[in-house]
Amino acid sequence: MARRNLSVRRKSPAEDASKGPVARPEGHGIASRLDRVIHEPVRLGIVSALAVNASLSFRELKDLLTTTDGNLSIHARKLEDAGYVRCTKNFEGRVPRTQYKITLAGRRALEDYIRHMEALIRATRKQA
């Protein structure tokens, strides 16, 4: 069976400029300012859940987000590295317990993210 080349050739800036100015939504550039750390669905779920709860355990987050241990662990670590979430580990008897809390920086980042998404939605609706 013959294979077809399905690659798309990108136009050079000169070719694009030859058509004149490109109409862009009023909110153009808003999407590029979205916080990519929070934008990922599991991480957005984590910070959103922590924003409305004083703290949540690893198990509570896992059950709430219906994700795996490994997936939650990786995404929580990314948020922790960004300074958006604080993780404390202790033991209750012999059972390890991991608790998560949103930090002030995490709360601000979530508020900024929501504002950016709202602006993007408004800009998109104006174009429709």
Image: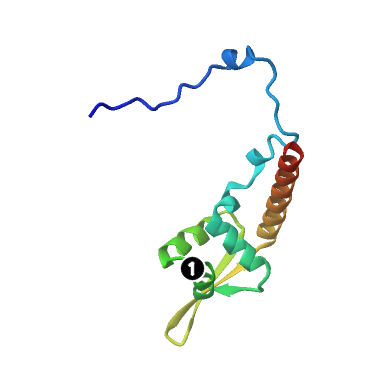
Q: Nearer the viewer, residue 94 or 64?
A: 64
Locate residue 98, reporting x and y percent: 51, 73
| In the depicted structure, whether residue 28 falls above or below residue 94 | above
Q: Residue furthest bottom?
A: 93
Locate residue 70, reporting x and y percent: 41, 63
At mark 1, the secondary structure is: loop
Q: Residue furthest front?
A: 1
Q: Is residue 1 left or right of residue 100?
A: left
Q: Amino acid at mark 1?
A: Thr
The quarter of the image holding the N terminus is top left
Q: Is residue 14 left or right of residue 114?
A: left
Q: Picture quarter containing residue 22? A: top right
Residue in view at x 60 percent, y 17 percent? 16
Residue in view at x 43 percent, y 83 percent? 95
What colouring style does the render use? rainbow
The quarter of the image holding the C terminus is top right
Residue in view at x 52 percent, y 61 percent? 76
**Residue of label 1:** 66
Locate residue 125, reporting x and y percent: 74, 43
Q: Nearer the viewer, residue 42 or 77?
A: 42
